[in-house]
Image (tube, rainbow, N blue to C red):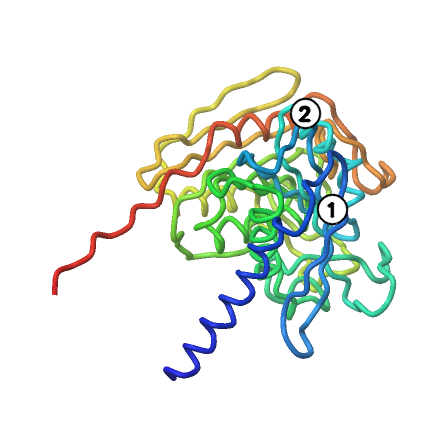
Amino acid sequence: MRRAAISMIVAAAIVTSAIAGAPANQPVPAPGNHNESIVVGTGANKLTRTFVVHVPPGFDGKSKIPLVIMLHGAGGSGAGAIAETGWDAKSDREGFIAVFPDGTPPHPDMPAQFLFNPRLWNDGSGSGTIGVEHVDDLGFISAMIDLLEARYSADPARIYCTGFSNGASMAFSVGLNLSDRIAAIAPVAGPFWYREKQFAYPVPLLFIVGTGDPFNPIDGGNVKLQWEKIKSRPPVEDSLKEWERMLGCGPEMETARGNGVLEITYDHCIKGGEVEYYRVQGLGHVWPGGKSRLPEKYVGKPSDNLNATNVIWEFFKAHPRTPIATPAAKND
């Protein structure tokens, strides 16, 4: 066991050294989009994972800057999420790195297709997403963060994750399972599948959903999706209550923002962090204030009454990670 442990440490050191050494051999990335890839997994589960990194103007490769991870919905892609959400333009205005990873299709050796071979996330739903239950998306995102910290000067104290639909559920999973690395999360229109879990470190949550979303009914219920075995969605409140429980939050405070937008905040959380919830009247399964690539008759109506990208960024800015206390060494 000791030899195995030493081998694992050495292997991890080699990988870390390779990533950490990358900046010395490469020029400072120019502003704009960069296509990156990384190999994750071993044996039959080894996959080349891809992602788009958007660099803002003025990036010098030295100053630590925030990182926003945007996870696309089922059938989408990292590149598609750029056009749908506008996170690239927000990155340029605010000066943070935005990254758009690609999920894995059930048949990774075949071209991805929206209906018949969609890119998906292993989001913690168990028997949910067909064909990707074996994919280590958490390992991929963690390795991607390593690369972005080393090559793109991502600030370890300001790493954030948002996502839409299946990507929203994956953002929940990232917040729970990588809580030692993530400062805050903001899922949009996707449920939290885990139950009876605990954080390693508290992670603030902002959640957005529309009252007209056919795939995430406010009160829960059955939905029809081609690529899932699970057909039932829990009520939206269930996801919020589970996160509130993990943070130890107190009573809610409700605020009507106008234009059919309701804001509910839980900010008295004894374990740290807070929960914010935005409910947009009439909004379908569409990124609020963004562009939908699917027909309205399938996903419901869009809405500009709330710009999710703007609201989420303000939430992220207000929630950098607090330093993790290191336990004092005990005297022998």
Q: Nearer the viewer, residue 268 or 316?
A: 316
Residue occupying the point 66% across, 79% down: 43
Residue occupying the point 61% across, 32% down: 96
Mark identifier at residue 167 = none
Give the mark, 2 or 1, whose residue is nearer the N terminus.
Answer: 1
Image location of residue 231, percent across then percent down:
69, 58
User: With respect to residue 250, does 196 lie above or below?
Assistant: below
Image location of residue 71, percent across then percent down:
67, 46
Q: Are marks 2 and 1 in contact (CB under 8 Å)?
A: no
How many other residues sit within 10 Å of disc 2, few (<14), some (14-19) or many (≥20)? some
Q: Nearer the viewer, residue 200 or 95?
A: 95
Q: Nearer the viewer, residue 94 or 179?
A: 94
User: With respect to residue 183, does 92 lie above or below?
Assistant: above
Residue occupying the point 62% across, 28% down: 95
User: With respect to residue 96, does 124 lie above or below?
Assistant: below
| Location of residue 34 by image quarter | top right
Image location of residue 307, percent across then percent down:
68, 25
Look at the numbered disc 1 and give the secondary structure of its residue. Answer: strand
Q: Which residue is mark 1?
A: 52
Q: Amino acid at mark 1?
A: Val
Does 193 sit left or right of 231 as displayed?
Answer: left
Residue occupying the point 77% across, 62% down: 105
Q: Label 2 vs label 1: CA separation?
A: 22 Å
Q: Which residue is mark 2?
A: 307
Does 6 sit left or right of 228 as displayed?
Answer: left
